Image: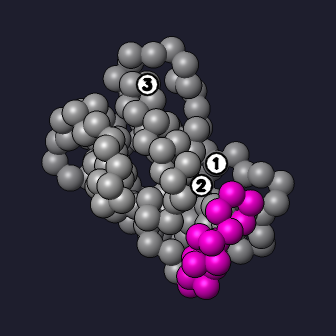
Amino acid sequence: MRLWSLHPAYLDPPGLVALWREALLAQAVLRGETRGYRNHPQLERFRQHPQALSAIAHYLLAVHAEAVSRGYRFDGAKIATPGPAVVLPVSSGQIAYEWQHLMAKLARRSPALHAKWQATGEPRLHPLFELRPGPVEPWERPLRRTTPEARE
């Protein structure tokens, strides 16, 4: 499960579809509707928020908006009714790590998108998140290929 902190606009079609499905699964976990993935590290940041269900609903709304802008027909009725807007913090190290991870995926899977985004200096965040300085988040399970910048 990968719940990107990056804006979903950067994802290729398979990545956006996977994000939609994984975020719906995360919503089901947070609602107590499934036993699978209950201890997945990507869910920690949502669980830590006092309005976890509202946070994942707002997360899904942004993914849905990106899908609709591309002409996809994701079923927005699957999103829980969100409460008031929420913001979750995300560290600069986490964003650097995710960007490196995404760029490696795009290089293999979608070379045209990789070329399009390669020169991006500071990637946009998913609207749910607010950037703060710091290292890779403690809940992240990094791949062995991390840059020193991602560890700062």
Q: Quadrant of residue 96?
A: bottom right
Contact, mark 1 vs mark 2 (Cβ under 8 Å): yes
Element marked by disc 1:
loop
Q: Quadrant of residue 12?
A: bottom right
- Identify the residue at the far front of this view: 71
The quarter of the rendered structure image containing the N terminus is top right
Sooner in the amino-acid sequence: mark 1 or mark 3: 3
Residue at 38% over, 16% down: 33
Q: Would you name the residue on which mark 2 appears?
A: 137
**Position of residue 92 in the picture relative to residue 54 (left or right):** right
Q: Residues within 10 Å of mark 3 (few under 14, many from 20)?
A: some
Q: Amino acid at mark 3?
A: Val
Name the residue that disc number 1 marks.
140
Task: Determine the CA span between mark 1 and mark 3.
Answer: 18 Å
Q: Is residue 21 above or below residue 135?
A: above
Hey, which residue is sitting farthest right in the picture?
144
What amino acid is at disc 1? Answer: Glu
Residue pointed to by mark 3: 29
**What predominant SS class does the magenta segment belong to?**
helix
> What colouring does the structure picture have?
one colour
Q: Is residue 32 above or below residue 123?
A: above
* 125 or 41: nearer the viewer: 125
